[in-house]
Image: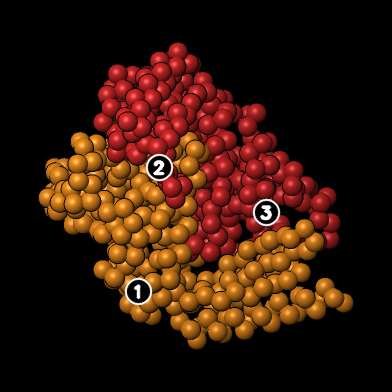
Chain colours: A red, B orange
Amino acid sequence: MSDGRTESGGEPVTAAVLVIGDEILSGRTKDRNIGYIAEYLTNIGVDLREARVVPDVVEEIADAVNALRARYTYVFTTGGIGPTHDDITADGVAHAFGLPVIHHPRAVEILTAYLGDRLNEARLRMARMPEGAELIENAVSKAPGWRIGNVHVMAGIPSVMQAMLDAIAPTLKTGQKMLSVTVEGRGLKEGDVGGPLTEIQTAHPGVMIGSYPRFDGKRFTTALVVRSRDAALMAAAQADVEALVARLQAEIED
Amino acid sequence: MSDGRTESGGEPVTAAVLVIGDEILSGRTKDRNIGYIAEYLTNIGVDLREARVVPDVVEEIADAVNALRARYTYVFTTGGIGPTHDDITADGVAHAFGLPVIHHPRAVEILTAYLGDRLNEARLRMARMPEGAELIENAVSKAPGWRIGNVHVMAGIPSVMQAMLDAIAPTLKTGQKMLSVTVEGRGLKEGDVGGPLTEIQTAHPGVMIGSYPRFDGKRFTTALVVRSRDAALMAAAQADVEALVARLQAEIED
């Protein structure tokens, strides 16, 4: 429902997530990062507009990075920055930017200080990144993430990714936060709500109204979520949705 | 590591997943379908090569469908086929194919038989699909999914999606199944394994070797996953990986 979006706080700030890893596409590992980043960005006023999962293939990573960084304010990648041969995110992102891959001097220092004589050739791979990249602090396990242009490269392990996102957040410009309110349509099926809900959506172009059914084994509930960047517009639509829910619930009880 | 892939059973059969829904990108709903489909396809010999999440916007859906259907054997979409105004997957896919959206006669019959006089205008939306689409059975809640060309359109609710995938599976051509074996590198950190693992990967071009570290709060384990379509090639690489793990574990115990 992009037509309904109101940007009362200036241009919206947009983002894409790029998850990198064969293990996600084989189903061996279940991604938890897209959902976490989605919720996090929503909370700070950045609109996540797209997410992709690609395999550990340099050209695939580069193509996706180029498609996404041209289109959105920010790109956030997860995965593929560890010490083994299948960690090739640095190569993919460098290829996308047409930059050489170097060992970042400060990253080497950090790894040396943390790992001492455990810093072998494999672990030194974690300092590889495109020339010109800036480091992103890793409060969990030291090996840093990095940023080049509008692309932020983070670890795939959720706890490490989350720490990196906390380090990145203060550096981001953010738009006016998307507000939302949920009206719980208890006892209502989505198909009962659909018709009149369309009329409410049409009458309120400054909001987006979503409809999310669930069934607890005994009865249906349809959650109606009203979203807007404008509190007054949201409240007006919310009132209409609440009236609809009350009316439909009364019909059921008759 | 696409370079290492061996297709000893003929052309690989490939796929992409397209998840459709603002609720996933806002973080309100956490996607569980990508992981399920990934594991399912791997088990039946179809390679999932890419996944995308796009918002409820007709042009975004159409662009993604066209990019993915041209590139992979199959596309599987989830979400956006319910009865409310924000369910616009039919419009997006029809736009991608340049086809008109019709009410599929058999789908209308199924909904009529199931819903009786509850079949209102909103629920009738669930029979909307591009002209020429074929139905996919929904054993859970009747409203069918559908297929047009190589694109399979499924519900977003996991239980319904899973039933539809079961209905689709027998109609798919499948490649030789990807085999895999996991060698648990207990006590080993990924950075200890990385160097010699690269040598093993280089020596075994017919297999893909992935490395997945975890930490249980007491000690590290790095799972080494050897994948191939050729059992003999996989066994040869597995032997080398097991020897490596045994050697590194012995070094730790010294």
Question: Could you tell me residue B211's position as x and y percent?
Answer: 62, 66
Q: Mark 1 points at which residue?
A: B175
Tell which circle, 3 or 2, labels the residue nearer the N-terminal end: 3
Q: Mark 3 points at which residue?
A: A126
Question: Could you tell me residue A120's position as x and y percent?
Answer: 75, 62
As shown in the figure, which amino acid type bears the numbered disc 1? Gly
Q: Are the numbered discs 3 and 2 placed on the same chain, yes or no?
A: yes
In what element is the residue under mark 2? strand
- Residue B53, quarter of picture: top left
Question: Could you tell me residue B128's position as x and y percent?
Answer: 19, 44
User: Mark 1 packing: few (<14 Cα in 10 Å), some, or many (20+)?
Assistant: many
Judge by depth and name the residue closer to the eye, B236 or B188: B188
* Residue located 74% across and 64% down the image: B220
How far, Cα to Cα, is label 1 from label 3? 36 Å
| Horizontal arrangement in the rendering, residue B118 relative to residue B157 (left or right) | left
How far, Cα to Cα, is label 1 from label 2? 41 Å
* Residue located 34% across and 25% down the image: A247
Judge by depth and name the residue closer to the eye, B68 or A93: B68
Name the front one of labels 3 and 2. Answer: 2
Numbered badge on residue A220: 2
- Residue A193, quarter of picture: top left
